[in-house]
Image: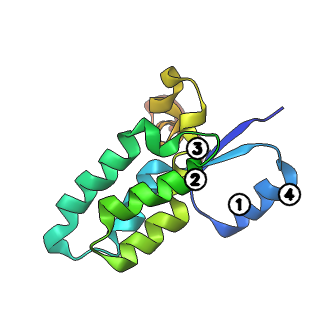
């Protein structure tokens, strides 16, 4: 039984997850969330905003499950990035699914909050290797 899914924010993928794995918790990739959030920020302040967003992701009380958890995370997001309305809106919309990893035991937080491990593995598989020289690349 699948209990936890980490994926990028892709509408088709999310629809398929809701249909096929409705009981699984969805974790939006934290790294992709940060990249997408910075699209709404002027270059002159993107370093400061990135630091604030990382702080929000590192703050365990923001992602606590239980009563008031989602409201608490949105309230904290408004406090952290409230100066830029477009960024605040994006963060408020996505913060709950970006901090789902806090439902897991602490030792899993680092590895299951992003898809980076999977992307790295895929790069290794696709990388040219002398032993695979005769195989076609896919």
Rendering coords of residue 71 (x, y %): 55, 56
Q: CA distance from mark 3 to mark 1?
A: 17 Å
What residue is shown with label 1? 13
Mark sitting earlier along the chain (3/1): 1
In front: label 3 or label 1: 3
Give x and y (percent) for residue 43: 18, 73
Which of pointers 4 and 3 indicates the residue nearer the eye? 3
Residue beneath disc 4: 19
Task: Give the spatial CA distance, label 1 vs label 2.
Answer: 23 Å
Residue 68 seen by the camera: yes
Q: Judge the density around disc 1: few (<14), some (14-19), many (≥20) Cα neighbours within 10 Å.
A: few
Element under disc 3: helix
- Mark 2 vs mark 3: in front: 2
4 vs 1, front mark: 4
Q: Nearer the viewer, mark 1 or mark 2?
A: 2
Q: Residue at x 13, y 72 (%)?
A: 44
Q: Which residue is mark 2?
A: 70
Numbered label attached to residue 100: 3
The earlier-in-sequence mark between 4 and 1 is 1
Q: Where 46 sits versus 95, above or below? A: below
Compared to residue 86, the image places residue 97 above or below, namely: above
Q: Tell me, yes or no, whether the two marked residues, 4 and 1, touch with CB atoms within 8 Å.
A: no
Give whichever of 5, 106 is nearer the camera. 106
Distance between the Cα atoms at labels 4 and 3? 19 Å
Asked if residue 48 is positioned above or below residue 82 in the image, the reply reads above
Quadrant of the rendering where the N terminus is positioned = top right
| Label whose residue precedes the other's in the sequence (4 or 2) | 4
* Residue at the (40%, 55%) spot, across then down: 76
**Residue 114 seen from this side:** no
Mark 2 surroundings: few (<14), some (14-19) or many (≥20) residues within 10 A? many
């Amino acid at each position: 039984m699948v209990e936890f899914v980490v994926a990028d924010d892709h509408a088709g993928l999310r629809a398929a997850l809701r249909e096929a794995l409705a009981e699984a918790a969805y974790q939006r990739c934290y790294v992709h969330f940060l990249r997408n959030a910075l699209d709404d920020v002027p270059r002159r302040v993107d370093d400061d905003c990135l630091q604030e967003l990382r702080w929000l992701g590192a703050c365990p009380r923001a992602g606590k499950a239980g009563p008031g958890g989602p409201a608490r995370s949105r309230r904290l997001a408004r406090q952290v990035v409230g100066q830029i309305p477009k960024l605040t809106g994006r963060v408020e919309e996505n913060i709950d699914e970006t901090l789902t990893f806090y439902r897991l035991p602490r030792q899993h937080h680092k590895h299951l909050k992003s898809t980076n491990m999977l992307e790295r593995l895929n790069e290794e598989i696709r990388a040219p290797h002398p032993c695979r020289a005769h195989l076609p690349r896919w």
